[in-house]
Amino acid sequence: MIKTKILFEIDYFSMLLTIGLIVIGILALAGATIDNPSDTEWVRQIQWTAIGFLAMIGILFVDFEFLVRCSGLIYIVGLFSLLLCFTPLGHSSHGADSWIKILPSVQVQPSEFAKLATILFLAKWLSKQRGEWNGLLDIIKPLVIGAIPSLLILKQPDYGTALVFVPVTLIMMYVAGLPGMYLALIVSPALSLMAINHDIIWILIWLVILLALLAISLFQKTPASVWAPFLSAGIVLFVVIYEFGPAIWNQVPSHARMRFEAYFAQDEDIRGSNWNLDQSKIALGSGGFWGKGVGMGTQSKYKFLPEFKHDFAFSVLGEQMGFLWVSILLGGFFLLLTRGVETAVISKTLEGSLIVTGILSMFFTHITINVGMVTGLLPVTGLPFPFISYGGSFLLSCMLGIGLIVNVRMRSSWERLRDKIAAVSSQMRIPEYDPNSF
């Protein structure tokens, strides 16, 4: 239960800032669809905002430490919900089995809530480490916790959401005390992709990095049980990709290959694979500094930009409201993330710090990839922008994430205040008379 005095420690700033960001998103969505009476997504977004606000308030009444204790069960429920997507209860959309149909008009995307469930379980598991990383098994266990839901989501397939689990897991491990050298070794097998084009320059770069990692590992006396498996895995993957890279690439679904190949040829096939990206750039550029005005965006209003409600909502915002409001939006997220970092620092428990770190990593990954995607700096992936993109499950999970951050902050602030009061009261006590002190 929530203590009355803790109510004064609620981070109203973060909650109001969150509502402000959502309002900006609803305005952009309404402006893009208001001329078409059949497009009522902005109304449903308001409904989901109301539900999310109640959920954000409700989660404040549950101590986050209790949620950590129950995180194993929450994690299992999250995995089970992901498996339901492959049953008759599952619903397919945009080529992915990512939804569960609750009612004829209500669908839930379990992967959004699986991210929060995984963050809670990782917080519990990593807090037991207490900064002790004694061998390969200590590293593998949290990686497996993050990999299981990621692989299930990859099977749907939803590559963007599956990717989010990678930085979230690694950053939480680092905050839990994983040495930077260990982190570099974990990601080193990914460098084997440099072999795919048989380019001698990239092969030499890979070899130099590999030898540097080996040298640093030996110099820092990193256990061989840690560096040997990851470097060996990198070498094996390098050989496999070098020999069978094209054959493996051909097994990747065609739409994923098309998006990746289009990234390296953005000026080609603008009426085909690069259509969304080209229209996104037009929308952002045409908005200028002040924007065209709410409801005046041509790329979204006339459906030139197909996915303007979801993946490219940031482009719609830029077209209607211009660079000014885009800057305000990003500034708001910067304040929100900065406030979250402060919460992670002042948390009196490692579990609280890890929960906040995981949620902030999730937000930062979504923002970075989405902005990179709509501007052409990164390949197009189906990853929405927090609080701006249309989607009930995503909005609800983001608001629950903010609720968890506020939960950690208000209890940490109250505990710090209580400790200060106890310290002051102890200092104000009159010392007992001691005759031996003279």
Image (cartoon, rainbow, N blue to C red):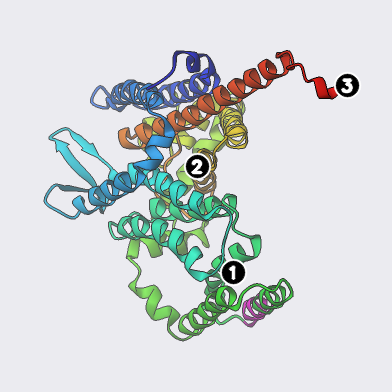
Left or right of 214? Residue 176 is left
Left or right of 202? Residue 160 is left
The spot of residue 226 in percent (x, y) is 56, 73
Residue 234 drawn above or below residue 337? below
Asked if the residues shown at circle 1 and circle 3 are in contact, with their CB atoms under 8 angstroms apart, the answer is no
Q: Which residue is mark 1?
A: 185
Numbered disc 1: secondary structure? helix
The magenta segment is 200-209
Asked if the residues shown at circle 1 and circle 2 are in contact, with their CB atoms under 8 angstroms apart, the answer is no
Q: Amino acid at mark 2?
A: Glu
The residue shown at (58%, 37%) is 344
Q: Which residue is mark 2?
A: 351
Q: Which residue is mark 3?
A: 438
The spot of residue 129 in percent (x, y) is 52, 55
Q: Is residue 206 magenta?
A: yes
Residue 31 is labelled as none
> Counting other residues with Cα less than 10 Å from the Cα at mark 1, is it few (<14), some (14-19), or many (20 or more)?
many
The residue shown at (45%, 38%) is 385
Residue 413 drawn above or below residue 395? above
Instruction: Answer whether residue 388 is visible to the viewer in this image.
Output: no
The spot of residue 340 in percent (x, y) is 57, 33
Numbered disc 3: secondary structure? loop
Q: Nearer the viewer, residue 124 or 308?
A: 124
Tag 2 or tag 3, which sits nearer the N-term?
2
Q: Quadrant of the N terminus?
A: top left
Judged by depth in the image, the label closer to the viewer, 1 or 2, is: 2
The span from disc 3 to disc 2 (Cα, nearest Å) is 49 Å
Q: Amino acid at mark 3?
A: Phe
The span from disc 1 to disc 2 (Cα, nearest Å) is 25 Å
Q: Amino acid at mark 1?
A: Leu
